[in-house]
Image (tube, helix red, strand yellow):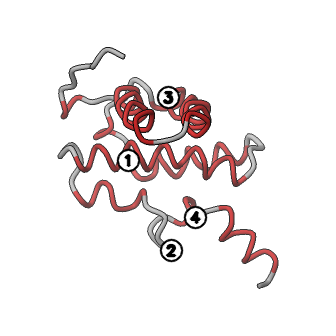
Amino acid sequence: MKAVKYTPDKRTVKEGIDRWLEVQRALKASSTVINYVSKAVHVEKKFGKRRIVDISKSDIELFQAQLLKQGLAPKTVNDIFTVVRGVWADAFGDGILKPDQQRWIGRRPGACRPLQSYRDRAVRQSGS
């Protein structure tokens, strides 16, 4: 695979996805990477040409809500957000994002309510 040269402050989501997937190919099983690639399509379709630094918290929350309204299962949406979290974590690690621009992408309770995992919702709905 040919290495791509990035200008960090101009990194688009598409470039971020490509970079993140390149790392995942080196670290993960091929079946896992295949799943990531299929989920990354949703992220690229929504934000691909936009710069990572230009995407707001509300953009991310609306994207998550739109995926659910389209009828995707919460687990599928959470899997899509594995890609989002990975791309944004790389952008943060590479100095593209400041800490306050990355922290709300995490899975911590209360960090960003719509990004809670499907398991958290299932537990709450079951009354456990």
* Disc with the residue nearer the chain's start (4 vs 3): 3
Which residue in the protein does label 2 denote?
A: 109
| Mark-to-mark CA distance, 2 and 4 | 7 Å
Q: Quadrant of the N terminus?
A: top left
Which residue in the protein does label 3 denote?
A: 44
Disc 1, SS: loop
Q: Confirm or deny contact between disc 2 and disc 4 (CB under 8 A).
A: yes
Give the residue displayed 26% in from the left and 60% down from the top. 100
The residue carrying pointer 1 sits among few (fewer than 14), some (14 to 19) or many (20 or more) residues within 10 Å by Cα, namely few
Q: Is residue 109 left or right of residue 66?
A: left
Task: Give the vertical position of 13 relative to 95 (above or below).
Answer: above
Disc 3, SS: helix
Q: Quadrant of the C terminus?
A: bottom right
* Disc with the residue nearer the chain's start (1 vs 4): 1
Which residue in the protein does label 4 denote?
A: 116
Residue 41: where, in percent of width, then height? 57, 28
* Disc with the residue nearer the chain's start (2 vs 3): 3
Q: Amino acid at mark 4?
A: Gln
Extreme residue toward the top, this view: 2
Task: Give the vertical position of 125 relative to 78 (above or below).
Answer: below
Disc 2, SS: loop
Mark 3, mark 1: which one is toward the viewer?
3
User: Is residue 126 or residue 28 the one in the foreground?
Assistant: 28
Give the residue displayed 75% in from the left and 69% down from the top. 122
